[in-house]
Amino acid sequence: MIKPTRPEVVLFLGAMLLLGATLSGAGLAARAWQLRRMATRDFRSMEIAIYDYREQQKKLPVRGKPLEDVRFGTPAAPNRNLCAVLLGAPGQGGDLNPGNIRYLRVGTASYRRSGINDKGDLVDPWGQPYQIVLDADDNNVCDMPGTSLSAAIGVPVAVWSHGPDRKAGTPDDIISWK
């Protein structure tokens, strides 16, 4: 058996290190794409739930007739209020969903998995609550006051995530209407 020389061993280890780094980078990119894809699926689930609710109930899942668009996902208005109605859990939706019809179909949140967290909020894969605006004034525009986002025109529901950096208004934000 021929014993490899020191330069051959170094060359072999360098090649293995380069191959490992390349494969690791590709794996990280694939995981990032998968998490973004998970968020866009949640957008569609929320949009469909609200469309179905509106079709059956002939109104949006909010109390009264607001004069302006309604936003969920903030500390003052967590999206759990909306999710409780759309999930149809007995006693959760109150008079907005007396039949306890399940409109929203999502799983339970866990590490790097979006879904309903232990507080009842629908969270993105990074653990942050989704931001949701309903076109409650029926002008075919979801206004985004207090954000750096432009209005969502032509949609009755706008959903977005702050993305991997968990900060609002940065390039990695994921939005449903573009």
Image (tube, rainbow, N blue to C red):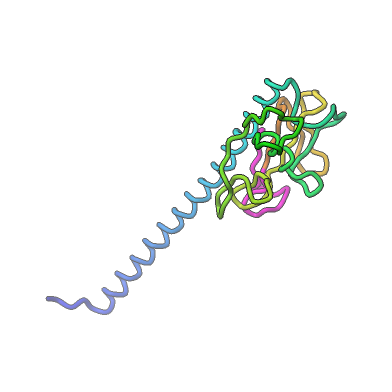
Residue at the image point whose x is 65% and y is 44% from the top: 122
The x, y position of residue 175, in whole percent, is: 66, 39
**Position above or below: 37 against 49:** below
Magenta span: predominant SS is loop
Q: Considering depth in this image, is 90 or 62 the residue closer to the camera?
A: 90
Locate residue 157: give its quadrant: top right
The x, y position of residue 103, in whole percent, is: 63, 30
The x, y position of residue 43, in whole percent, is: 62, 36
Q: Considering depth in this image, is 147 or 58 the residue closer to the camera?
A: 58
Q: Give the range drawn in magenta.
A: 161-178
**Position above or below: 13 against 146:** below
Total number of numbered discs in the rendering: 0
Q: Considering depth in this image, is 3 or 167 the residue closer to the camera?
A: 167
**Position above or below: 61 against 172:** above
Residue at the image point whose x is 65% and y is 31% from the top: 47
Locate residue 148: give its quadrant: top right
